[in-house]
Amino acid sequence: MTNEVTVPLLPCASIDDIEAFYGVLGFRTTYKQRKPNACVGVQREDLHLQFFEIAGFDPEQSYGSCLVLTADIEGLHRAFAAGMRAAYGKVLVSGTPRMTRPRSRKNADGLGGFSVIDPGGNWIRVFRDAATAPMPATTPAGRLAKALANAVVQADSRGSVGQAVRILDSALARPYADDDPVEQVEVLVYRAELAMVLHDPKTAAEMLARAQSVTLTEDESERAAPAFDNAAELAAALR
């Protein structure tokens, strides 16, 4: 048999909060009921999700998760980010709900991915479909790039933000003369993002300022452009 469809069924504390949030991301409601069990279904193109309400449910304790495979993680992330900006005035990078940025995942053969953590505490993990990946993934070579890759696994994949912070702080505390300046910018900006997840705006602002002060050549500035785009988004969220 072919053309089977699997639809995740995930827990939440409020189907109304879920419906409103996914509406921001461009989903439409396909089904909703209050009794005998409160549940809601949402759809965005071929992406279907359903949720059931549990009285007293704590999103912070949720283990709900699912994978979404797509050929265009960047396009989906841009669409979600645009919806957040329109609804909230910024991309949500801390608290619940929130969204991470597309990054290469060491624990997924280097394929890019990002996560949406919804109001139910569910992790919707978006990955590039390996069948459509444009080129083989590369392994980070520099010391700081390796630290960043390990930190991304901890925070973006496992939700262990504290461990990711320890990895980055250790790498930043011992600068090497041959460190790649672009990797330094990337590490500082990601450290700022993690500070915001931990509700530490002072450290976030400090890390963003340090990233801006890194001396770069014209070529390095071009390579660091995505990190600075992220930095600008984080700075806007701090205001």
Image (tube, rainbow, N blue to C red):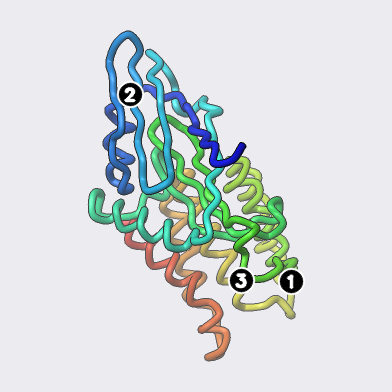
Q: Secondary structure at mark 1?
A: loop
Q: Amino acid at mark 3?
A: Gln
Spatial CA span between label 2 and label 1 = 45 Å
Residue receiving disc 2: 14
Q: Earlier in the sequence, mark 2 or mark 1?
A: 2
Whether label 1 touches label 3, CB < 8 Å: no
Q: Quadrant of residue 199?
A: top left
Q: Residue at x 35, y 12 (%)?
A: 37
Q: Earlier in the sequence, mark 3 or mark 2?
A: 2
Residue receiving disc 1: 142
Q: Amino acid at mark 2?
A: Ser
Q: Secondary structure at mark 3?
A: helix
Q: Is 176 on the left or on the right of 119, as rendered?
A: right
Q: Earlier in the sequence, mark 1 or mark 3?
A: 1
Disc assigned to residue 184: 3
Above/below status of 175 relative to 36: below
Q: Is 142 on the left or on the right of 88, as rendered?
A: right
